[in-house]
Amino acid sequence: MENVDPTVAELGEVEALKRAVAVFRRAPSTLVGSGDDAAVVAVEDGRFVVTTDTMVEYHDFRRDFSTAFDLGYKAVASNVADVAAMGAVPNALVVAMVIPPATKQSWLEDFAKGLQEGIDQLAPAAEVVGGDLASGSQIVISVTAHGHLEGREPILRSGAKVGDVVAVAGTLGRAACGLDLLFHEDATLAKAYDEWASVQRRPQPPVSLGPVAANTATSMLDVSDSLTLDATRIAKASTVSIKLNKAALEGYAAVLELAQQSMTARDGIVRSAMDWVLFGGEDHALLATFPAGSEMPKGFKIIGEVIAQTSTPLYLDQEPLTPMGWDSIKG
Amino acid sequence: MENVDPTVAELGEVEALKRAVAVFRRAPSTLVGSGDDAAVVAVEDGRFVVTTDTMVEYHDFRRDFSTAFDLGYKAVASNVADVAAMGAVPNALVVAMVIPPATKQSWLEDFAKGLQEGIDQLAPAAEVVGGDLASGSQIVISVTAHGHLEGREPILRSGAKVGDVVAVAGTLGRAACGLDLLFHEDATLAKAYDEWASVQRRPQPPVSLGPVAANTATSMLDVSDSLTLDATRIAKASTVSIKLNKAALEGYAAVLELAQQSMTARDGIVRSAMDWVLFGGEDHALLATFPAGSEMPKGFKIIGEVIAQTSTPLYLDQEPLTPMGWDSIKG
């Protein structure tokens, strides 16, 4: 009798990969796709952008919170956000995975479908051009994403100038709120506020705005660790200080208030929606600086200003603000 | 008192990475190096080559057989061999690592030094332009390597033509012999035949011959899984069959005879040096086909010929040869 859902070990690497790879759609910039020693990708302006990000089971995700499809989607989102933050258009991904030998082939194929859905939604010019499948005790997902600058200069974190406005595109605090919901003892809450739990599972970075912003932005990065940590990175790299405007951030917190109140009502633990906005990561918003008065792409919202460097890199209104967020080793 | 060798968890990701990254040397093709959301690399002909390979502790390596320096070297070697096998010059690597939080910072820095030594020896035009450090229960090393074709066409595995010669550059069987030595109950043997154990720890692929061979080769790949598996891949992709010449392979086996005899003398287990040559992987030799009579780069040695496709993809002299080797999931 045929085994309807074999493990990847039963199938072997070659066959397991072949079936998973069948999910992927071709992209025009791929000159040689997966299946040879290496892929070949066109970048007409003679430069490629490259970034890598790794997710580890139990540390960065849990299989009871996220489906295989979710994880594929998130692996794309977190990587193409970095490509977009340079001002580039994502064009190629390679995916290295470690999975336990007992992993079902259906899990691997659902993951591949999530990768393709992430590409379709966030990076439609890109293709999974290569990968590697290895065996290990815990799941590791390591994506390397590439992009094409289309002749533009890359937007670094070091270009912010005194007098620039600080602006953000995308959401803030939702992924952190979603994580608290998923960890909450009352499992009904994550369902009740599924919109926020979903941002944790499938972030929605405004990837297409990166190349548009690159026409006028003086600095840009993607908010992966937290607004305060990533704004501080711009400040330090640009030898400036950044003043965030609390009133401009209150809208991001306001939409999360109801979830915060519901959680506190259940367990009595006091939470702050503004803390999610300031110190939560994984929304993968784009944070950029633009010359004051310059045209800003639709979708960006001003949340602060660049001021002359002081001994404190970051302020919330007039108060020094200590950056906090995620360290992937310390946790 | 200062902790002279802290763990990476004690230092935190940012500081641990900063100290390890200080080891890396800059390369001229790097337009934006590590430290921003992504790196930017020049490829003047408007195409980049990309490949990825992952090594997992206990499955692909053991820390009692290989030092951190060895692992860094090997991670470079196995990846740049794939770039070379396309006919490209390696120019940029990104390195994603998962390490247990208790890993010593000195281990991470020795690994970085091994990466840089592998680059210096095998891919001197390349730079480590990015990476990621994550926390997990077992060490995972995932390298993505890039290369520049310098205007040449990529050499695929599908281009072999009937009448071509089959040739190899680099070593065969040594890494497999080395692995048997390292696993042998008599630990003195790996020391006595250190030259073969060393190939297992620090493979020496003939990377610089890849771009040279690309001027005349009709097909090429790097022998990572075994000569028989990889020759079969060329045969199937090119819809031909390949006949290996046993006499031409005997020289590769002959140098390993003494190690084979010493192992058998100790434990009575019969081994075959020719089996290492045919079925052993990880030497990362370049296997290529060239039109008969064409100029072949110095360093390549003819080991067979391409014949019309039969029901058997591979022969050793007149006998059908069943390919065997490494499957990274089945093990």
Image (tube, coloured by chain):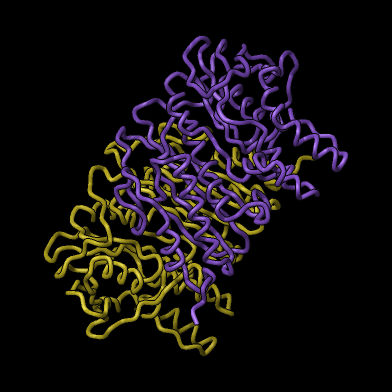
Chain colours: A yellow, B purple
Residue B162, image x and y in percent?
A: 57, 12
Residue A25, image x and y in percent?
A: 46, 39
Answer left or right for A88 relative to A144: left
Query: Exactly how many numbered labels are in the figure?
Result: 0
Give the vertical position of B72 relative to A184 (above or below).
above
Point out the image quarter for the C terminus of chain B: top right
> As drawn, which residue projects farthest toward the left?
A293
Closer to us: B172 or B162: B172
Task: Name which residue lies at 47% across and 29% down.
Answer: B210
Residue B264 visible (yes or no): yes
Closer to us: A258 or B77: B77
Task: Name which residue lies at 18% across and 74% down.
Answer: A307
Closer to us: B298 or A25: B298
Residue A191 visible (yes or no): no
Task: Name which residue lies at 26% across and 85% down.
Answer: A319
Residue A107, image x and y in percent?
A: 62, 52
Closer to us: A67 or A142: A142
Answer left or right for B1 relative to B321: left
Residue A33, image x and y in percent?
A: 47, 34
Answer left or right for A80 relative to A328: left
> As drawn, which residue projects farthest toward the bottom?
A268
Which of the 4 image quarters holds residue B198? top right
Give the vertical position of A181 relative to B203 (above or below).
below
Which of the 4 image quarters holds residue A4? top right
Give the vertical position of A120 relative to B206 (above or below).
below
> As drawn, which residue projects farthest toward the front?
B192
Give the vertical position of A163 relative to B282 (above or below).
below
Answer left or right for A315 relative to B54: left
